[in-house]
Amino acid sequence: MLTRSNNGVAVEDSTLTEEERVGKEQSELVPLLTGGKLKSYQIKGVKWMISLWQNGLNGILADQMGLGKTIQTIAFLAHLKGNGLDGPYMIIAPLSTLSNWMSEIARFAPSLHAIIYHGDKKDRDEIRRKHMPKTIGPKFPIVITSYEIALSDARRYLRHYNWKYVVVDEGHRLKNSKCKLVKELKQLPIENKLLLTGTPLQNNLAELWSLLNFILPDIFSSHEEFESWFDFSGKCNNEALKEELEEKRRAQVVAKLHAILRPFLLRRMKSDVEQMLPRKKEIIIYATLTAYQKNFQDHLINRTLEDHLRETVDAGRGMKGKLSNLMIQLRKNCNHPDLLESAFNGSYLYPPVEQIVGQCGKFQLLDRLLAKLFERKHKVLIFSQWTKILDIMEYYFSEKGFEVCRIDGNVKLSERKRQNPQMDLQAMDRCHRIGQTKPVHVYRLTTAQSVEGRILKRAFSKLKLEHVVIGKGQFKQERTKADGSDVMTEEELLAVLRDDEDGEDKWIQTSISDENLEKILDRSDLITSSSDDENNEAKPTPIPLKGPGWEVVIPTATGGMLSTLNS
């Protein structure tokens, strides 16, 4: 509440707690947001969006995933609606998140009317007829749709509406300025745009320009001109000065990007603004190649795997596939050699589950890990980039008698809604987010003595140039090759895998013991509260940062195989 000081100036009542102050500010700023409480930094995020709106600017909300970009966006749209701006508004998002957007709007701002614009052509025709009249009024809904439907209907239907505001979730999908989605969205009449992304913008200026060109085409109209802003190059024949000049050039790039992006981009990190989140620990557990996998890997390196598989294929079944792309085949072998065999011989039948586990080091490790996690009554999420690995896992869980819920790109929207609409591929941040009450352990299974366990260390030691990426309130630098590529050639790959002298540390190549597995499963050091510190109670001893078969990932660590990958 406001009171008056002795000189008559209105001041804020100092008796209000921080929670009461934020609640009061929310009720004044977004009275329609009745289903939840915004945090202080989320209020600032909403104010930032309002400021962009008032100044006729578009922007990128790039908060780290888990900080509530969804509720901030809903609050902003509720603010606009509450001030008599009927829209229309459209949210374009991945298919997997449409139901979540719908449920979050209903939860936090139940007075807002929203619809999911999805389905086949007949379904969409019916939605437009019933819910999307050409005349915009207070009852016109917030339209929630997927990239695919936006791409399909942009020119034929969606361009007939003068969109007051369009939100693109997972906005980094637009980093390629030549992709069809960008071209189609540019055809829509849109007054204001907001991109949401929890993924740092990275790798090159062309990708950054694509996003800026989409939200601010009048300012960032020319890619060539944008690139020229960062051309601080100059010839130098003095080797001693080259490194100093390169450092100066990078500093100039960072400073200029700061100046350019500051008005249009907002990014906060969990470590900065969300102190109530439970702690998280990421641990790499190294699986060892089984003899079966080692045999496959040797055949791949020597380019004899196809001949080997021909000898093992049943004569009456015939050949069904051909192996190509060495990197992919080596990665498949790490995840499970059945990915190679089944693709090659066309088999749709899995061997007994004991054989599935016995053939693969990762599955042996997973089998041990799951037994101990289920014994402790933990909830488990498993993420893989390979749908065929999910097939094998589904078979494994079925044979083991475990209940499993699977979601991948082939699951229909209606089925996603029934199961869990919030799941997607970004595993760690999907678990470690607002609302999580228990510590999160992330186990990254990596195969030692393989393309996974050895190539990362070699690849990142060879990288030459540095490119700027948006990080925690500043611009961080990642390295890439001189030709812009971050992919090793096949010759480099084979050299790494054949070079015994460039092998990993012995502790990486060691299978983790049951005793050490028990140690890394212990999360008591994450549960210790601040009150324990104040009472000088003995703290649980954390596990060492690395040991035989494991390595704890520390964001600030300088050593460790994956430390150079952490942003």
Image (cartoon, rainbow, N blue to C red):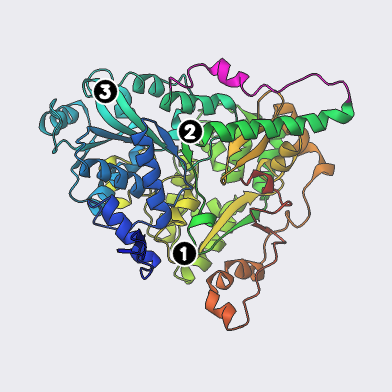
* Secondary-structure class at tag 1: loop
Q: Quadrant of the C terminus?
A: top right
Residue 126: image x %, image y %? 13, 30
* Secondary-structure class at tag 3: helix
Q: Amino acid at mark 3?
A: Asp
Q: Splitting the image into 4 quarters, where does residue 481 fall?
A: top right
Q: Quick check: marks 1 and 2 in contact, CB under 8 Å?
A: no
Tag 3 residue? 153
Residue 541: image x %, image y %? 66, 74
Decide if residue 269 is on the left or right side of residue 92: right
Residue 338: image x %, image y %? 54, 42
Check the image and report above or below for 529 versus 358.
below
Tag 1 residue? 276
* Label number found at residue 346: 2
Say few, some or many: other residues with alpha carbon within 10 Å of mark 1 (under 14 / 14 to 19 / 20 or more): few
Visible residue check, residue 416: no
| Residues at marks 1 and 2, CA–CA distance in whole angstroms | 51 Å
Residue 470: image x %, image y %? 57, 39
Q: Relative to the observer, which residue lies in front, 426 or 17? A: 17
| Residues at marks 2 and 3, CA–CA distance in whole angstroms | 38 Å
Q: Relative to the observer, which residue lies in front, 382 or 273? A: 273
What are the residue bounds of the magenta stretch? Answer: 217-238
Marks 1 and 2, the one that precedes in the sequence:
1
